[in-house]
Image (spheres, rainbow, N blue to C red):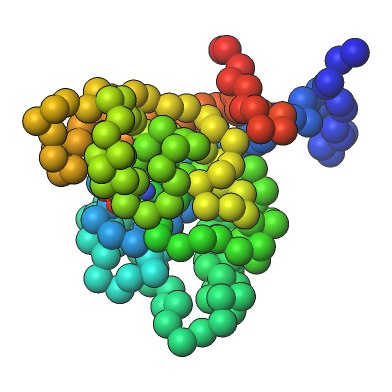
Amino acid sequence: MSVYKYMRVSDTLFLYNPHVLNIMKSPVNIAVLVSGRGSNLQSIIDNMDSGYIKNAVIRVVISDFKDAFALERAKKHGIDAAFADPKGRPKQEYEAEILSLLKSHDTDLVVLAGYMRILGSTILAPYKDRIINIHPALLPSFMGLHAQEQTFEYGVKVSGCTVHFVDEGMDTGPIISQRCVPVFEDDTADTLSERILEQEHKIYPEAVKLFVEGRLSVHGRKVIIRDI
Ligand code: GRF
């Protein structure tokens, strides 16, 4: 049986697949949440500038750290840069401020790029299956903080990075894509981190592109990527 359904927009009936996360909209408005240096933010900006990611615009970059270098990167590219201060406030109130920024920028997709907080239901509920994150390990191994150090200390021979949808857990949402890197005997946690980061800068723009093109759909834990 077909999964497609009909949707009426104005006088026209459109056929759409309810499992596909974003009905094609142009441009797709993106908000990026950051806490630090923002090299993944930069890789997404660069891939938009080069035309690899089309029909999308980063409307706002939001940081929970006032001095995050990612905010400078945003300003340099003429993107709205906002600081939301979480200190001394209930999480719900802090997240309500972020939600209001997301709404005022008409956000379709939320990209976490080194954002160091667990999202609560204030943001998760209205953006279900529209928030993605990158993690510097092959999930479900080495979840949580300092993944590269955890990986290095454990002595695995292969590591990598994972892009996933965000749910209420820490690094537990459905996996969109993963990339492996080798771990060498003369590695340090730093050299391994650099090798992983190089791949992060490739798979994150790829995943954003897939979302923007409406090619991702979530079926339980599985993310299906539709061919063009
Ligand atoms: C990256 O390693 C990412 O995987 C993790 O936090 C780091 C952020 O780096 N979630 P950057 O701020 O994008 O340079």
Pick whichever, 184 or 190, lies toward us: 184
Looking at the rendering, which quadrant does residue 90 occupy? bottom right
Residue 54 point in image, percent of width and height: 44, 30
What residue sits 50% from the left and 46% below the top?
Answer: 171
Is 211 placed above or below 75 here?
above
Which quarter of the image is occupied by the N terminus?
A: top right
What residue sits 86% from the left and 26% below the top?
Answer: 5
Looking at the rendering, which quadrant does residue 200 occupy? top left
Which quarter of the image is occupied by the C terminus?
A: top right
Q: Is residue 119 visible?
A: yes
Residue 117 point in image, percent of width and height: 46, 63
What residue sits 28% from the left and 59% below the top?
Answer: 36
Looking at the rendering, which quadrant does residue 223 occupy? top right
Is 148 placed above or below 201 here?
below
Is 138 placed above or below 128 here?
above
Pick whichever, 94 or 189, lies toward us: 189
